Every structure is written in C-alpha cells, then in structure tokens.
Amino acid sequence: MAVRMFTPDGLMQPTPYHHVAVGTGSRHVHVSGQVARLADGAAVAPGDLAGQVAQALRNTATALAGAGATFHDVLRLTFYVTDWRPERIVDFMAGVEQVVDDLALPQPLPPASLIGVDYLFEPDVLVEVEATALLD
C-alpha cells in the first residue's frame, strides 16, 4: 500500500484522525471540493450538517473510485465548514459515522483539517471536502 498512517508518541491522542501519513507511491490523486449534491445537482440534506458531511464523503468516495483509489489511499482530507462553532463537532462526527461502514472509512481518519469559513459557493452548502491520495 502506498500510504502508511500513524500518530507518533507525544502528539495529542485520541483524535478521530491520524496525525501523519507517509506516502511512497508515485501517482497523485487530487479530489476537488465535494459537497452534498447528487449527480444531477440536487441538494442533499439542506440545513443538516451531519447529512451533508455524509453525502460529501460519499461523493469523495465516488471521485476516488474514478481514479482507482479508496479512502485507504488518502494522505490528507480537508473539510471546510460554514459557521463553525466547537459544539458543531457532534453533528460533524455524526455525519462521518453515518458512512464509516458503507465507505470503508479508515478509523481513525487520515490526517485531516477542519477549517471554519463564513460561506461556501452557494448559501445552502454547509461543508466541502477535499482529498489527496497516493497510488503506487
């Protein structure tokens, strides 16, 4: 496998993600920001952060699969969430938990950042996910 994930001693634990990913492959996969939309553009889970996180991760899985990758090949995830407040982590993680089994999400997740933003490209979009993967 091209990606090895771990959390070295001395870094905060437990966390829902690994702190480090080491890639040894040669083919990079960069997935653009995925949101809670179906292929026809229909919005999924309006106003529901958990539902939007789940759908954005489903779309990310579809994009990865198109390149022959899975979440196990992901070096890094970046989440952008509108109107972020620390108490929203419960809903955010509920969205992740909704799709852990269906998408075979590694637990803990690959190294990840969650960035609070004022807004995304459309007012109803609450979350956007970017992924970077590495394949042999």
Image (cartoon, rainbow, N blue to C red):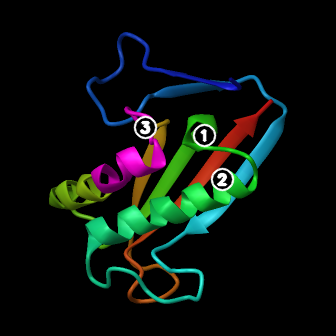
Mark 2 Cα shell of 10 Å, populated few (<14), some (14-19), many (≥20): many
Q: Is 90 one of the magenta-colored residues?
A: no
Crowding around mark 3 (Cα neighbors within 10 Å: few <14, some 14 to 19, many 20+) is many
* Residue marked by disc 2: 64
Q: Which mark is residue 74?
A: 1
Identify the residue at image location x=42%, y=51%. Answer: 102
Q: What residue is at 30 percent from the left and 32 percent from the top?
A: 15
Instruction: Say if 7 sits above or below 40 in the image.
Output: above
| Three-letter amino acid code of the residue under disc 1 | Val
Camera-nearest residue between 3 and 102:
102
Mark-to-mark CA distance, 3 and 1: 9 Å
Q: Quadrant of the N terminus?
A: top right
Q: What element does badge 3 sit on?
A: loop
Q: Relative to 89, is 56 on the left or the right?
A: right
Which span of residues is magenta-colored? Answer: 96-108
Query: What's the mark number on residue 109?
Result: 3
* x and y, in percent, of residue 26 in the image: 84, 32
Which residue is at a point 26% across and 52% down the rendered structure image? 93
118 left or right, relative to 33: left
Identify residue type, mark 2: Leu
Q: Position of residue 83 (x, y in %)?
A: 29, 73
First in residue order: circle 3 vs circle 2: 2
SS under mark 2: helix
**Image quarter for residue 16?**
top left
The amino acid sitting under disc 3 is Leu
- Taking the image as shown, residue 100 lies to the left or right of residue 66, namely left
The extreme left residue here reads 87
Residue lying furthest front in this view? 102
- Which secondary structure lies at badge 1? strand
Magenta stretch, overall SS: helix
Proximity of marks 1 and 2: CB atoms separated by less than 8 Å: yes
Q: x and y percent of residue 135 in the render? A: 76, 35
